[in-house]
Image (cartoon, rainbow, N blue to C red):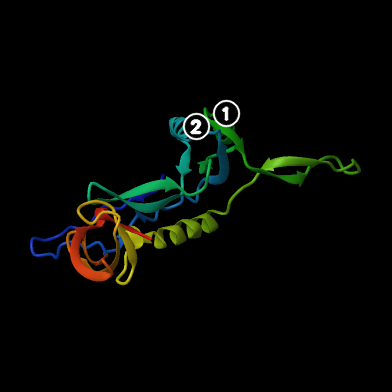
């Protein structure tokens, strides 16, 4: 049940070319199964991928919240997905036995728990025990929806008037100011040469915000 990266919308032959200023929607919200009991699992260091594989093998539903960031590789925008919460995954189980499988799964360090009074015969001294914390599926769904709604990011954060540094080409290391965001991931900048601005068109991979 990990969040899915939404695909790009179909584009017709006459659609406009993409621009470096176009926002990118990172993910679509997923539906939380309300028939399951949801908990928070913590993974061992550097064992996140193995833990997810082990949980999926035990048919345990997982939700791993991720954040989107846009990087530029060889002049092209790439949306990279990174975990939002370090070593944390939400799990949905059918019953206590299923939760026990999650607890002993490879790569799982613990199931997040909270203290509760222990049930016992009347008159006994009450003691405190640690019980797995349960999440309200409706609250978890609201969290998922809010995260998906906020997953609109702008490549590099470039805007008109932004100060940038040219990274390569004949104007490498020159300071510049963004004058326009152009189609096909290009920008028009005013490069400062001997104190005078000179307009230049560059790929967005050739500039870096400062």
Image-quadrant location for residue 18: bottom left
Residue at image location 52% in from the left, 58% down from the top: 138
Q: Nearer the viewer, mark 2 or mark 1?
A: 2
**Secondary structure category for the residue under label 1:** loop
User: Is 180 left or right of 146, judged from the image as shown?
Assistant: left
Image-quadrant location for residue 53: top left
**Secondary structure category for the residue under label 2:** loop
Residue at mark 1: 104
Farthest front residue in view: 194
- The answer to which of 95 and 154 lies nearer the viewer is 154
- Counting other residues with Cα less than 10 Å from the Cα at mark 1, is it few (<14), some (14-19), or many (20 or more)? some
- Counting other residues with Cα less than 10 Å from the Cα at mark 2, is it few (<14), some (14-19), or many (20 or more)? some
Image-quadrant location for residue 154: bottom left
Q: Are marks 2 and 1 in contact (CB under 8 Å)?
A: no
Residue at image location 48% in from the left, 33% down from the top: 55
How many callouts does the rendering have?
2
User: Is 197 left or right of 106, judged from the image as shown?
Assistant: left
Disc marking residue 13: none
For marks 2 and 1 on the same chain, the one whose residue lies earlier in the sequence? 2
The span from disc 2 to disc 1 (Cα, nearest Å) is 14 Å
- The answer to which of 110 and 195 lies nearer the viewer is 195
Residue at image location 24% in from the left, 55% down from the top: 8
Provide residue 131's location: percent of width, then percent of height.
69, 41
Q: Up-down: is 189 above or below 95? A: below
Q: Up-down: is 191 above or below 76? A: below
Residue at mark 2: 47
- The answer to which of 19 and 104 lies nearer the viewer is 19
Which quadrant holds the N terminus?
top left
User: Is 100 left or right of 168, judged from the image as shown?
Assistant: right
Farthest left residue in view: 13
């Amino acid at each position: 049940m990990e969040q899915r990266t939404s695909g790009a919308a179909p584009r017709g032959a006459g659609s406009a070319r993409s621009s470096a200023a176009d926002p990118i929607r990172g993910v679509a919200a997923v539906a939380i199964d309300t028939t399951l009991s949801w908990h928070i699992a913590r993974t061992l260091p550097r064992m996140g991928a193995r833990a997810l594989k082990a949980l999926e093998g035990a048919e345990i539903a997982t939700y791993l919240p991720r954040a989107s960031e846009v990087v530029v590789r060889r002049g092209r925008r790439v949306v990279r997905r990174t975990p939002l919460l370090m070593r944390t995954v939400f799990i949905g189980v059918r019953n206590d036995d299923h939760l026990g499988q999650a607890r002993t799964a490879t790569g799982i360090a613990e199931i997040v728990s909270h203290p509760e009074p222990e049930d016992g015969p009347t008159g006994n001294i009450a003691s405190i025990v640690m019980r797995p914390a349960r999440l309200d599926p409706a609250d978890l769904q609201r969290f998922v929806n809010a995260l998906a709604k906020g997953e609109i990011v702008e490549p590099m954060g470039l805007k008109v008037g932004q100060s940038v540094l040219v990274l390569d080409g004949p104007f490498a290391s020159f300071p510049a100011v963004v004058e326009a965001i152009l189609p096909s991931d290009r920008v028009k900048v005013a490069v400062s040469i001997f104190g005078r601005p000179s307009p230049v068109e560059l790929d967005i991979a050739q500039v870096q915000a400062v």
